[in-house]
Image (tube, rainbow, N blue to C red):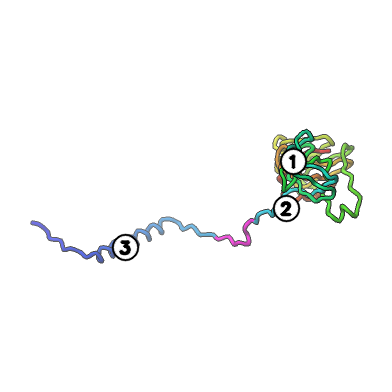
Amino acid sequence: MFTRFRPISCAFAFACLSGIARIATSRAMQASPMVPLILIPLGLAVAPVPAHEIGTPAWAIETATLRTGPGSNYPAASGTVTAGQALRVTRCTRRWCTIDGSTGWLSMDDLSFGQTPTDYFAAPQPVIARGGPGEVCFHDAENYMGQTICLPSGAVARDLSLLGWDNRIASVSVSGTVSVNLCRDRDFASLCTLITRSTPRLERLLTRAASSYQVW
């Protein structure tokens, strides 16, 4: 004996399937905890570093021709600097630095660091202390606090990770006739700052971000 099935309409079938789907979705939501959606206000987003903040402020002491590499034996580059010109140094080797806005290199002997236009013309050129006696001390907290390591003139570290001090320096104390060239990357690359006096708080791009140094 055969059972006769009555045909169902498409509308009725769609309604049944929709109901089954709603039940399955409800059960799945009950079984799995809901993850809240967190929206971050635009005001709290990390702002990019303005281009004018990249590099170390410096001044050209003499009119000079840029070189294509870090040395006077390299060919002249397509660019010159004039005495008194404001510059931004982006990275340095032992004696030569690259200048922001160009692909050329300039001797450190032709540079003066960390001055303003007013200071440059209204006051004598500061003397960069070199050779000692004296020492430079690095501190892993601001205001000369935390762990400390002190070094004499002539000390060089191309990679601070080998000394356990990579990305740790937060303040620098200077005593005597010494100074230090502190750089953000290994091998004196990227942002470098010449520090000639005690600094209780490093600039933002160097704070706990330095990876090499040269003590003069």
**Nearer to us: label 1 or label 3:** 1
Q: Label 3 belongs to which residue?
A: 18
In the rendered image, residue 48, in percent from the top left (x then y), is placed at 65, 54
Q: Is residue 203 magenta?
A: no
Density class for disc 1 (Cα within 10 Å; few <14, some 14-19, many ≥20) is some
- List the single residue furthest toward the left: 1
Q: Secondary structure at mark 1?
A: strand
**Nearer to us: label 3 or label 2:** 2
Can you tell which mark lies on residue 65? none
Residue 136, quarter of picture: top right
The residues tagged by marks 3 and 2 sit, at their Cα atoms, a distance apart of 59 Å
Residue 68, quarter of picture: top right
In the rendered image, residue 144, in percent from the top left (x then y), is placed at 80, 47
The residues tagged by marks 1 and 3 sit, at their Cα atoms, a distance apart of 73 Å
Of 122 and 212, which appears nearest the observer? Answer: 122
Q: Label 1 belongs to which residue?
A: 77
Q: Amino acid at mark 1?
A: Ala
Work out which quarter of the rendered image holds the N terminus and state it: bottom left
Q: Amino acid at mark 2?
A: Glu
Q: Are marks 3 and 2 in contact (CB under 8 Å)?
A: no
Name the residue rendered at 83%, 42% in the picture. Answer: 110
Q: Amino acid at mark 3?
A: Ser
Of 51 and 65, which appears nearest the observer? Answer: 65
Can you tell which mark lies on residue 53? 2
Residue 193, quarter of picture: top right
